[in-house]
Image (tube, grey):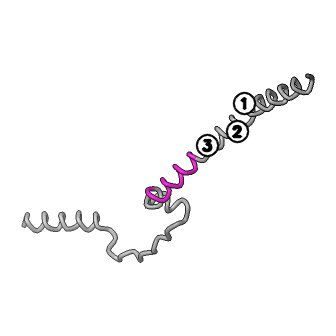
Amino acid sequence: MESSSYELNVVSSWEYLTLFLFRPLLAIVFVLSLLLLGWFLAWKLVLVHVPLVQEIFGLRKKPVKPKPENRRRLTQFYNNMDSQSSSSQW
């Protein structure tokens, strides 16, 4: 008779162990796996193509362009306007 009551206690302690240890652990693993899967899909589909993310993680090296000699476009624009206005006044 005692062995059957002992087996019931073992089963009930196994159920408590399952209830308080394995279920929360499995829930945490499930949520983390969903988060990792979502991050992986977002990374592969969207984030890799964003230039800011590429620059932060060093995924794309920016080609170095030589600066043009006539960089001062605004200055040239205003100089041209001044020269046109002065020539139109004469």
User: Residues in magenta?
Assistant: 34-46
Disc 3 residue type (three-letter): Phe
Q: Residue at x 77, y 28 (%)?
A: 16
Disc 1 residue type (three-letter): Leu
**Farthest-out residue, front:** 1
Which of the two discs, 3 and 1, sits closer to the camera? 1
Q: Residue at x 80, y 30 (%)?
A: 11
40 drawn magenta? yes
Along the horizontal axis of the image, is 5 left or right of 80? right
Q: Determine the secondary structure under disc 2.
A: helix
Q: CA distance from mark 3 to mark 1?
A: 16 Å
Disc 2 residue type (three-letter): Leu
1 and 2 marks in contact (CB < 8 Å): no
- Give the percent coordinates (x, y) of residue 55: 50, 62
Q: Determine the secondary structure under disc 3.
A: helix
Earlier sequence position, callout 2 versus callout 3: 2
Characterize the local packing of mark 3: few (<14), some (14-19) or many (20 or more) Cα atoms within 10 angstroms: few
User: Which sits in the foreground, 32 or 49?
Assistant: 32
- Give the percent coordinates (x, y) of residue 18: 74, 34
Earlier sequence position, callout 3 versus callout 1: 1
Earlier sequence position, callout 1 versus callout 2: 1
The quadrant in which residue 69 appears is: bottom left
Q: Residue at x 48, y 59 (%)?
A: 44
Residue 19: image tag: 1
Q: Which residue is mark 3?
A: 30
Q: Which residue is mark 2?
A: 25
Along the horizontal axis of the image, is 4 left or right of 73? right
- Give the percent coordinates (x, y) of residue 26: 67, 40
Prevalent SS, magenta region: helix
Which of the two discs, 1 and 2, sits closer to the camera? 1
Quadrant showing the C terminus: bottom left
